[in-house]
Image (tube, rainbow, N blue to C red):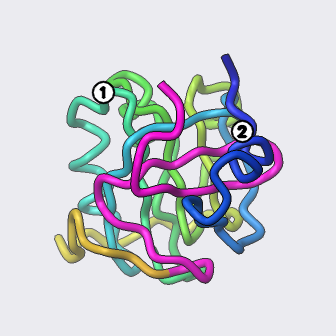
Amino acid sequence: MPISTPDLCDEFGDDVRVLELPLRHYGAVRNFSGEVVTIKCFEDNSLVAEQVKQPGEGRVLVVDGGGSVRRSLLGDNLAGAAVKNGWSGIIIYGYLRDVEEIAPMELGVLALGSVPRKTEKRNEGQLNVALHFGAIDIAPGDYAYADETGVIFSSKALVS
């Protein structure tokens, strides 16, 4: 059953945090949720590449790329790996590329926008750290819920 972020906000009030960013949907899945895995990186998607190749188990990868417009943090190859490995979705505070190829993929993908330039692989970044963007704090193990209306986070599972 699809989740409704407005209904969850109404039901759980202050137990949810609303992401205040103008993210756009890029994947075929527009309604997704799951436990959060976090990455903090800047113009280097080495950790994103590593994580999407791991079993996703229905989780959501949340990537804080600092909002940089200069480099994409996700492309069609990594999105394809996320689909293959069972990730529910990827939320990026940053940009991606290969928009046409990602569009039909059975994956929830949200990002600020798109840019054609790939990242340099410097093996920099941090995995499973607390993030702060979009006026909220996001921690590893939180739960993300996304639909056409928006994205919310909670420290506990809101639906089973």
The residue drawn where x is 61% and y is 66% is 14
156 sits left or right of 128 in the view: right
Count of numbered circles on the image = 2
Q: Residue type at mark 2?
A: Glu
- Residue 47 on image: x %, y %: 24, 60
Look at the image and say whether residue 142 sits in the magenta stretch.
Answer: yes
Few, some or many residues within 10 Å of mark 2 (<14, 14–19, 20+): few
47 sits left or right of 158 in the view: left
* Residue 63 against residue 106 in the figure, above or below: below
Rendering quarter of residue 41:
bottom left
Few, some or many residues within 10 Å of mark 1 (<14, 14–19, 20+): few
User: Of discs 2 and 1, which sits in the foreground?
Assistant: 1
The residue drawn where x is 60% and y is 55% is 97
**Which range is magenta?**
133-160
* Of residues 21 and 35, the one drawn nearer to the viewer in this rendering: 35
Residue 100 is labelled as 2
- Residue 36 on image: x %, y %: 37, 50
